[in-house]
């Protein structure tokens, strides 16, 4: 595998890259992650089984559009490829540490605001389905935000749970309720990171950096809501965001709806206590 990676990387870089150093690093629960170096250049490599290449290609497209926005900083995509048994994606390597200082938290808040204000899109969705963690995330284009989120986010996750034998609530009735609760809310579609918890943001030598996106065009509040779900973001992050793109006062009414999606997805991926958390949030939404 490593010989194939070195050969294909050399072909992409247009110079011979010999792997003189290889170190396993933290990078998530789905793929094995490594730092490789020839003594001068360093790259970040994610490796999985060969049939995973489609997911890496989708990740590459998400990274590409975020870089195209020239707003948030994401690692540079070098290439995707396969060996006989493995698939891989290679990015430039950036040493990172938690984004826990005031200055860079404020800066990232402003960068995210610029992302949400970037470009124009009339509908909600994305040009392709992608993945949030290991879960398929449908992104069929939809003109009505309430319909998109109710069906392709909440309804989708509840259906995945039903296929596991778990029925928290009647899917059709609850999907219709979500549609009704969001019916009067038709925000300007924003390009979203899509999986914005604190583990997907860090500080680097070039400032704040984010990674592992699950992009689509949707309500910007979805990104902000997720930053609150698992906490980890400094107050300065929100100050930076609102200095450029203030949130509507009614955001608080929708936050639980948006975060329910991630709790359902976490249950579908990891099981455990996320089922109880999702059930509690459903009860809050029903009472709201």
Image: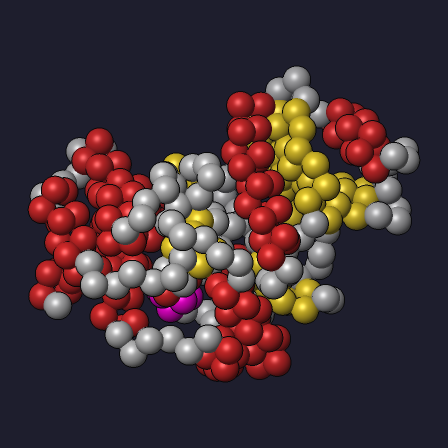
Q: Tell me where residue 146 appears, x and y as whole percent.
A: 24, 54
Residue plotted at (57% across, 35% down): 56
Which portion, as a residue range, is magenta? 224-229
The answer to which quarter of the image holds residue 246 is: bottom left
Question: Can you name the residue that lies furthest to the top here?
Answer: 84
95 up-or-down from 65: above or below: below
61 up-or-down from 174: above or below: above
Q: Is residue 97 in the magenta section? A: no
The answer to which quarter of the image holds residue 90 is: top right
Q: Quadrant of the C terminus?
A: bottom left
Q: Main secondary structure of the magenta part?
A: helix
Q: Tell me where residue 241 appears, x and y as whole percent.
A: 49, 75
Count every numbered label the image shows and give the total: 0
Q: Is residue 54 visible?
A: yes
Q: Tell me where residue 29 appears, x and y as whole percent.
A: 49, 44
10 vs 193, nearest the viewer: 193
Left or right of 197 in this view: 97: right
Residue plotted at (27% across, 51% down): 144
Left or right of 192 in this view: 255: left
């Amino acid at each position: 595998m490593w010989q194939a990676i070195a050969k294909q990387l050399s072909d992409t870089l247009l110079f011979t890259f010999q792997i003189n150093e290889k170190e396993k690093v933290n990078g998530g629960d789905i793929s094995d992650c490594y730092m490789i170096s020839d003594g001068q250049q360093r790259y970040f490599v994610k490796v999985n089984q060969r049939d995973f290449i489609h997911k890496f290609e989708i990740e590459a497209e998400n990274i590409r559009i975020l870089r195209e926005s020239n707003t948030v900083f994401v690692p540079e995509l070098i290439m995707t490829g396969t060996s006989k048994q493995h698939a891989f994606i290679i990015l430039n390597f950036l040493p990172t540490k938690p984004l826990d200082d005031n200055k860079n938290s404020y800066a990232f808040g402003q960068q995210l605001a610029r992302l949400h204000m970037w470009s124009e899109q009339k509908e909600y969705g994305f040009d392709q389905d992608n993945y949030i963690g290991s879960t398929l995330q449908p992104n069929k284009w939809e003109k009505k935000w309430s319909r998109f989120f109710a069906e392709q986010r909440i309804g989708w996750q509840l259906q995945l749970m039903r296929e596991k034998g778990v029925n928290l609530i009647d899917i059709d009735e609850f999907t219709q309720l979500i549609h009704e609760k969001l019916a009067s809310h038709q925000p300007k579609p924003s390009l979203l990171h899509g999986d914005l918890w604190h583990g997907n943001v860090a500080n680097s030598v070039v400032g704040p950096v984010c990674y592992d996106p699950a992009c689509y065009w949707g309500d910007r509040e979805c990104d902000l809501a997720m930053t609150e779900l698992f906490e980890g973001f400094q107050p300065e992050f929100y100050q930076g965001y609102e200095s450029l793109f203030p949130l509507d006062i009614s955001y608080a009414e929708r936050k639980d709806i948006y975060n329910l999606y991630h709790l359902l997805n976490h249950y579908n991926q990891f099981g455990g206590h996320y089922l109880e958390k999702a059930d509690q949030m459903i009860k809050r939404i029903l009472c709201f």
